[in-house]
Image (cartoon, grey):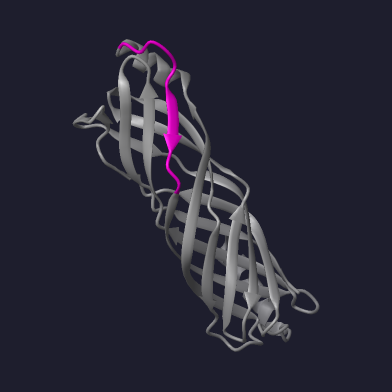
Amino acid sequence: MSMKLLVALAAAALSVPAMAYESGTFILRTGIATVSPDVDSDALALSGTELTGTAADVDDASALGLTGVYMLNDHWGVELVAATPFTHDLEVKGLGATFDLGETKHLPPTVLLQWYPMDANSNIQPYVGLGLNYTVFFDEEIDSQANEVFAGLGATGNADLSLDNSFGMAAEAGVDFAFGQDQRWLFNLSVWWMDIDTEAEVKVPGVGTIKADVELDPLVYMAGLGYRF
């Protein structure tokens, strides 16, 4: 986004009195959210034996983000974060050339307590939040490339992938720019940090079970629109 557009939004937001951030106000925000994992993987272990130099990796993914906020008073609100499923590609490094392990989908329902520091009538309203995240992994699939690699290791059939769900802390920062005739509409920029850890398990027939503890700890970015009821 250009600096000129941000300046124009700020000027528009300051030109008209805003609908207040006050007790009982409900705020709905939506936009394209991108999950960017900061991956830290232990070495893979095959049936308990560590495979030195190996690691798992997880690519970025985007989906439709949706948040709902209920204002407790002028400065405090409770937010629920939801989204359509994110689909991540998974890779394995260190077993020869890096190869595609497969993919997984996840949903990251998150609840945060938010603080809005500005006056309730401010047309530009930054905020921060702290809360808890529960990440659900599902629809895990093994890539055909991975099955070819495992076949070279003596696999007698296709592998099966699963990832444990995760529970951890979450934090956020964001800002609303109010616009429109009654200032109910918002342009929103927001970012979350989520503590997401999982154990990946690949069962390879005829070879054994490969496991890896993986810290994802992603930043989640969203730009979109909001509306105050």
Give me the residue at 49% from left, 55% from top: 134
Q: Main secondary structure of the magenta part?
A: loop
Q: Is residue 51 left or right of residue 57?
A: left
Name the residue: 44% across, 60% down. 193
Q: Is residue 177 magenta?
A: no
Magenta residues span 154-165
On whether residue 164 falls in the magenta region, the answer is: yes
* Residue pictured at 44% horizontal, 25% vertical: 160
Give the quadrant of residue 55.
top left
With respect to residue 39, does 139 lie above or below?
above
Q: Position of residue 25 (x, y in %)?
A: 70, 79
Q: Is residue 115 left or right of residue 149?
A: right
Camera-side residue of 218 and 134: 134
Which residue appears farthest toward the right when viewing the image? 181
Relative to the observer, which residue lies in front, 96 or 74?
74
Where is the N terminus found, in terms of image quarters?
bottom right
Residue at image x 37%, y 33%?
A: 201
| Residue 142 against residue 189 in the figure, above or below | above
Q: Position of residue 4 (x, y in %)?
A: 60, 67
Where is the C terminus found, in terms of image quarters?
Answer: bottom right
| Residue 4 in view of the camera | no
On the question of residue 108 being in view, the answer is yes
Count the labels in the image.
Answer: 0
The location of residue 169, given as percent across then percent down, is 42, 62
- Locate residue 196, reporting x and y percent: 41, 52
Residue 98 in which image quadrant: top left
